[in-house]
Amino acid sequence: MESKPGKEGEQGPASPSRQLRPRSRRPQGQVAGGPRLCSGDSPHIAALVLARGGSKGIPLKNIKLLYGRPLLAWVLRAAAECGQFDSIWVSTDHDEIANAAIKYGARVHRRGEKVSSDSTSSVDTILEFLEHNEGIDVVCHIQCTSPCLHPHHLTEVVRMMKEEGYDSVFSVVRRHQFRWKEVPKAKRPRRQDWRGELYENGSIYMATTELIKNSGCLQGGKIAYYEMQPEYSVDIDVDIDWPIAEQRVKKYGYFGKLNQVNHVLFSLDTHLKCKCQNSKINNDNIQVKFFFDSDQKRKEQSVEKWMKENCKGWENVAYFGNDDSDLKLLKKACIRGASHDAGPKALEMADYICGTGDRVHDVDEFLDYVALLMEKLKAEDPSEGNASECRDPNGGKHLKMKTLKRGVEETKKEMLEKVQKGKKKK
């Protein structure tokens, strides 16, 4: 991953470049002109996602399920877990979007009608947000349609603003696409010999409040771009983008901090017993257990009894349930699943919502989801001995890096033996 400065003032009217310096201390909870959102000497940095309800290309796109969770949830999780923002907001005009935002930890700004039309620009919507929420020094506009955004992308952009004194930073991706003009001759280089061109990928636009208010744009002043790799540069606009984005998210999306899962428990209706009890997960280290009982008390007793006999605690258990009778047990599990037609309280609690519309297929879908998470956890764990990929920041090429602890110890042993042999020869 690399970040490079663009030309100052290149992307709009320039404002005087300034380091993000602490503002004068005011009494806690107060700010000139309105309530203060945070206290202390550090600049208040707010993450802002714009998510109106009137999307034409894909109706209610912002809360449509993308691999088991609302589209909005992918960027909100990355924003929350990067730990760089003093507040995280969603600007919306729709009740369902507002509820989803609250579920995933964001604060809601109910935008006015004037900034909720098809013709309203992002800058106008951000200016309206700033009018109603004073005390914000820097706005990081995160686009909801970029579901492969990771915390480290946001962390680096915030670092550039804080430490390098930029007024605005935006994300780009490098593409190797040849553009043609109607000219008599054209010299076409080999793709390998060409660095390509930079395109805005729409993931991140970060700027000081001063710049946005004075110039009416998100790019200006002392400006820089932040280059993201192509695999993370996903943008959803029309229906045809959705299945592609879902496959990219499965491979490159950010799934949060993961726990090892040893057991997957299902709470299902009794009529599904014959159809589901033979379902298996593609992981020999995970045990699958089904509970078929519609009586809440009996179900809780059966599950708790089984847990005492087979598990040390709920931190390594995934639970799937659809009814109010499952809420207490869902709350205890480290991964929570539900069908898309489950009760509203179960849906609110679920980490993963199945979209097949068939309860039997939902079992297999949730098992596949848990198996995928365990594959990702294994790839992150250096003790597992898997080859992990990293990027050369200079050339962007893949490097294979063995992370075997045992291998490191063996290498040290071999080096010591060589040193000892060399001493004996002398």
Image: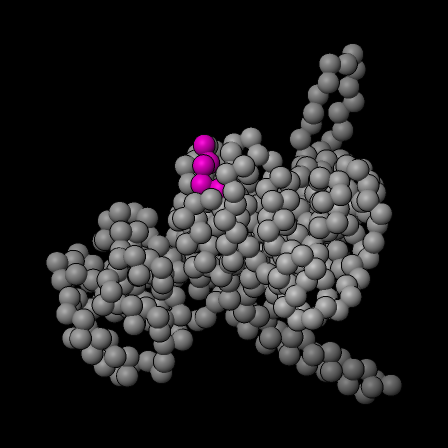
| Direction top: furthest residue | 184
**Dividing the picture into quarters, in which one does residue 58 lie?**
top left
Q: Is residue 53 magenta?
A: yes
294 relative to 5 in the view: left or right: left
Magenta range: 52-56
**Dividing the picture into quarters, in which one does residue 9 lie?**
top right
Residue 43 visible to an observer of this rendering = yes
Q: Is residue 64 magenta?
A: no
Main secondary structure of the magenta stretch: loop
Residue 74 visible to an observer of this rendering = no
19 relative to 293 in the view: left or right: right
Q: Position of residue 53 (x, y in %)?
A: 45, 41
Q: Position of residue 156 (x, y in %)?
A: 69, 57
Q: Between residues 105 and 160, which one lies in front from this camera angle?
A: 105
191 relative to 285 in the view: left or right: right
Residue at coordinates 17% horizontally, 75% vertically from top-left? 297
**Dividing the picture into quarters, in which one does residue 213 lie?**
top right
